[in-house]
Image (tube, rainbow, N blue to C red):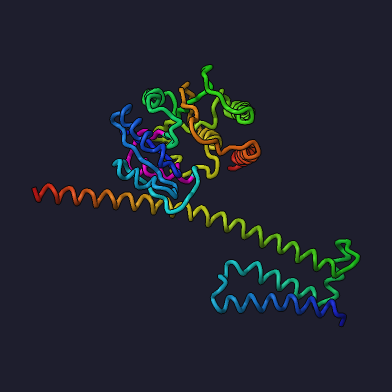
Amino acid sequence: MKTLIIVPAYNEEESLPGVIRDLRGNIRLADILVVNDGSKDTTARIAKEMGVAVLNLPFNLGIGGAMQAGYLYAEQGGYDIAVQFDGDGQHLAGEVEKLLRHVREGNADLVIGSRFLEQGGYSTSVFRKSGMWIFSTILSRMLGMRVTDSTSGFRAANRRVIEFFARTYPDDYPEVEALVLLHKAKLRIVEVAVNMRERTGGTSSITPLRSVYYMVKVLLAIFIDLLKK
Amino acid sequence: MDVLKILAIVGSGTVLLLVVELIRRGRLKERYSLLWLFAGGVLLVLSSSRNILEYISNRVGIYYPPSFLFLLAFLFLLLITLHFSVTISGLSEKNKRLAQELALLRQEMQELMLDRTDSKKSTDE
């Protein structure tokens, strides 16, 4: 099956080479596409030098618009499977196969790699944890299934989801909302336990105040989605 | 004629004239001017005819008729800004699509150019 790894990158010149090497070393028979979301650093040049396909957005669209550009590429290129893989080095290429297997076997239309499905060592701040708990509870109710890691950006989609996302994909904080849209379109979602790397350098951009804002905004978006025809 | 009435007529008349002039010069598209023209027209009629204004005010239960004018003007502004929000949402969606299409096109072009230089190389050799 024709597989595409979509790597959204915004100012990721430091981590991108490692991410691409990781992907090349662990996955054969898959194309890599970097979606450069209007980076101000040398992300575009690095991706080009490493010989992967690059979509250079003329300005910063945000993760939603960038991800959708990747899905458009997958749709037009006739790919059967698309994998979302963060450009910041958080995701492990060795775990991709776990997602792919479920898509290939047709267990689900979208497979999410979850950090929390199994008791692992992944720790995060209390604020993020409580925010994620609220999302999970609400989403689990809404979707009629247990969702442990709704904000995970580590996902694999089959052709039906690729075509759906090429048409409709949420803008600002799309991970959670996308699940609601898929559920409404009667597409099947499944979670698979994966390991992720914990952030080593730098600080998270998510401050307590921002995560509250993020939560309110996403919750609002979810409820609006439910109201839409 | 009291001062308030003159003020109201001049005000709504100016809005109307300004909008018409902007359309005439091509600075304002017709589709965005309809609400403005409608608002200006209604306000002009109401401010120049005391009878209609007082009649409606009484029916609605407003004791001071000119305040009905303010209410109406306020509602029109609300409607116009809402119209803008809808328009901006549509534009930002189209803008996003254009950016994505542009990136896809550039990528395709790059690939075609690579193919061409590759085949050139192989024929040269």
Q: Is residue A34 left or right of residue B80?
A: left
What x and y, as percent, mark residue A84? Answer: 42, 35
Magenta stretch encompasses residue A82: yes
- Magenta stretch, overall SS: helix
Q: Is residue A110 left or right of residue A180?
A: left
* Residue B47 location, quadrant: bottom right
Depth check: give the residue in front, A71 or A124: A124
The quarter of the image holding the N terminus of chain A is top left
- What is the residue that sits farthest to the right in this orientation? B63
Q: Residue at x 84, y 67 (%)?
A: B67
What x and y, as percent, mark residue A205? Answer: 56, 39
- What is the residue that sits farthest to the left in this orientation? B125
What x and y, as percent, mark residue B25? Answer: 55, 78
Depth check: give the residue in front, A32 or B36: A32
* Residue A66 location, quadrant: top left
The quarter of the image holding the C terminus of chain A is top right
Q: Is residue B34 left or right of residue A18?
A: right
Depth check: give the residue in front, A77 or A19: A19
Q: Is residue A201 visible?
A: yes
Q: Residue at x 43, y 23 (%)?
A: A107
What x and y, as percent, mark residue A72? Answer: 40, 44
> What are the residue bounds of the magenta stretch?
A65-83
* Residue A134 location, quadrant: top right
